Image (spheres, rainbow, N blue to C red):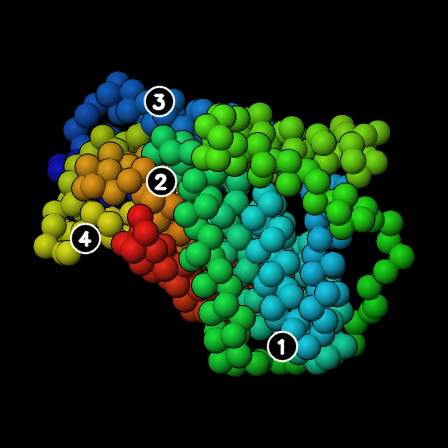
């Protein structure tokens, strides 16, 4: 059997198993095995390609685990809540959708996972929504849209691994997403949210506890600022500080400056727990990425786009979108796409930084499908049923499409 078709069958099996609530990690590994065997490689060669795929993303996995220190600091010290409340209080109830979207964008851009950012902000959104009788569909879309915008400029796993697979500086990949992220935020808040149906309006609820002990805004920002400055030394001064150092250093400084040094173990444990799940998922993802990369599937995609003007450019966001749809995960989608297509994308003339940035943006297009955890975690944060949550998918997809499109346009003009 043609290796491209075999790889697609293996990928399809993984998708079906994930949809059926089978373990995503084992689903991906099984899909990789089936794909390799159907390609006629034999068990030994199939396993070798799977291991090669895991080896290639191991450096990124180490960096992702290190990033858990910053994540743990932001969430467990209350810094993330402080930042979100400060933005919402500053913009006021009149601009609540902008406030929620901007809060999610800032938190995610600082290294908080999108679902964790939404869960952190959701209590404030619920109370405000009940007080003003707002639509919970619009409230959740504002948070999700802002989170997606922040995710393409963040030191989160998806950005780290895309940069790693393209051998591009993380700070440069983050910087390449700034213009698309800002446009995406504006479109989400001022066009998509106002035009979507209101649905049922919220009412009742309880007041938020403003007496909760939280660090000040400036103290909360110190850790993320240190991280960003350390990463920025490479493009600014030519001093290379690896994310494996910059992310935990910023996190530890944040823990100390917020006065939580006695709770450092708690912060580190939380961050490690969050990153461990991603790291394990990436092992399964790496096995499938190894099989896909070794197959002819990238050649099929190259041939499909050969007649297009700038076909190589479109390969990046399209592969990111397809793989995010397959896995319902930004991280897994960016991993498989960048590991499988990085060489072909750069061979088409796309620079490493923009190839990683466009794959990263493309991975936001369909990462919210129901067979992934993001769909359920965000819906649960606003007490939505599955039927209610499904109604948001077209609007989330539109936000991701705008981010991917703006990334391509930005590359064409300034890349």
Residue 382 placement: quadrant = bottom right
Residue annotated with mark 2: 353
Residue 187, horizontal then vertical, whole percent: 47, 69
Q: Is residue 134 left or right of residue 275?
A: right
Say few, some or many: other residues with alpha carbon within 10 Å of mark 4 (under 14 / 14 to 19 / 20 or more): some
Tell me if label 2 and label 3 are in contact, CB under 8 Å: no
Tell me if label 4 and label 1 are in contact, CB under 8 Å: no
Pick the residue in front: 360 or 390. Answer: 360
Residue annotated with mark 3: 51
Q: Is residue 250 visible in the rendered structure shown here?
A: yes
Tell me if label 1 and label 2 are in contact, CB under 8 Å: no
Q: Nearer the viewer, mark 3 or mark 1?
A: 1
Say few, some or many: other residues with alpha carbon within 10 Å of mark 3 (under 14 / 14 to 19 / 20 or more): some
Distance Cα–Cα, label 3 vs label 4: 33 Å
Residue annotated with mark 1: 135
**Residue 379 against residue 92 in the figure, above or below:** above
Residue at 32% across, 22% down: 52
Q: Quadrant of the N terminus?
A: top left
Distance Cα–Cα, label 4 vs label 1: 41 Å
* Labels 3 and 4: the sequence-earlier one: 3
Tell me if label 2 and label 4 are in contact, CB under 8 Å: no
Distance Cα–Cα, label 3 vs label 1: 48 Å
* Labels 3 and 1: the sequence-earlier one: 3
* Labels 2 and 3: the sequence-earlier one: 3
Going by the picture, which residue comes out furthest to the right?
Answer: 211
* Labels 1 and 2: the sequence-earlier one: 1
């Amino acid at each position: 059997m043609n290796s491209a078709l075999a790889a697609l069958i293996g990928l399809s099996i993984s998708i079906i198993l994930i949809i059926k609530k089978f373990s995503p990690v084992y689903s991906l590994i099984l899909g990789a095995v089936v794909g390799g065997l159907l390609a006629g490689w034999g068990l030994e060669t199939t396993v070798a390609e799977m291991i090669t795929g895991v080896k290639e993303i191991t450096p990124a996995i180490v960096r992702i685990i290190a990033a858990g220190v910053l994540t743990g600091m932001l969430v467990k010290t209350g810094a993330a809540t402080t930042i979100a409340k400060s933005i919402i209080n500053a913009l006021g109830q009149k601009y609540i959708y902008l406030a929620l979207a901007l809060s999610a964008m800032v938190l995610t851009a600082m290294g908080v996972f999108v679902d964790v950012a939404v869960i952190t902000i959701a209590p404030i959104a619920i109370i405000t929504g009940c007080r003003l009788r707002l639509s919970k569909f619009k409230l959740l879309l504002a948070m999700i849209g802002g989170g997606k915008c922040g995710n393409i400029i963040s030191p989160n796993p998806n950005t780290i691994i895309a940069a790693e697979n393209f051998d591009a500086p993380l700070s440069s990949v983050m910087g390449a997403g700034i213009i698309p992220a800002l446009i995406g935020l504006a479109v989400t808040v001022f066009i998509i949210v106002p035009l979507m149906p209101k649905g049922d309006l919220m009412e009742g609820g309880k007041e938020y506890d403003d007496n909760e002990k939280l660090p000040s805004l400036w103290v909360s920002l110190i850790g993320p600022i240190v991280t960003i400055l350390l990463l920025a030394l490479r493009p600014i001064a030519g001093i290379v500080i690896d994310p494996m150092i910059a992310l935990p250093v910023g996190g530890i400084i944040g823990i100390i400056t917020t006065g939580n040094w006695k709770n450092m173990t708690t912060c580190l444990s939380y961050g490690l727990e969050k990153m461990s799940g991603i790291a394990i998922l990436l092992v399964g993802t790496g096995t499938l990425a190894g099989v896909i990369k070794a197959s002819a599937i990238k050649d099929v995609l190259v041939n499909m786009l050969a007649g297009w003007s700038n076909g190589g450019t479109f390969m990046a966001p399209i592969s990111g979108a397809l793989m995010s749809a397959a896995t319902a995960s930004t991280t897994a989608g960016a991993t498989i796409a960048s590991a499988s297509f990085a060489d072909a994308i750069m061979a088409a003339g796309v620079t490493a930084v923009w190839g990683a940035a466009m794959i990263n943006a493309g991975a936001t297009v369909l990462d919210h499908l129901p067979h992934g955890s993001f769909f359920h975690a965000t819906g649960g944060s606003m007490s939505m049923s599955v039927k209610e949550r499904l109604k948001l998918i077209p609007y989330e997809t539109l936000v991701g499409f705008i981010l991917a499109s703006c990334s391509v346009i930005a590359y064409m003009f300034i890349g």
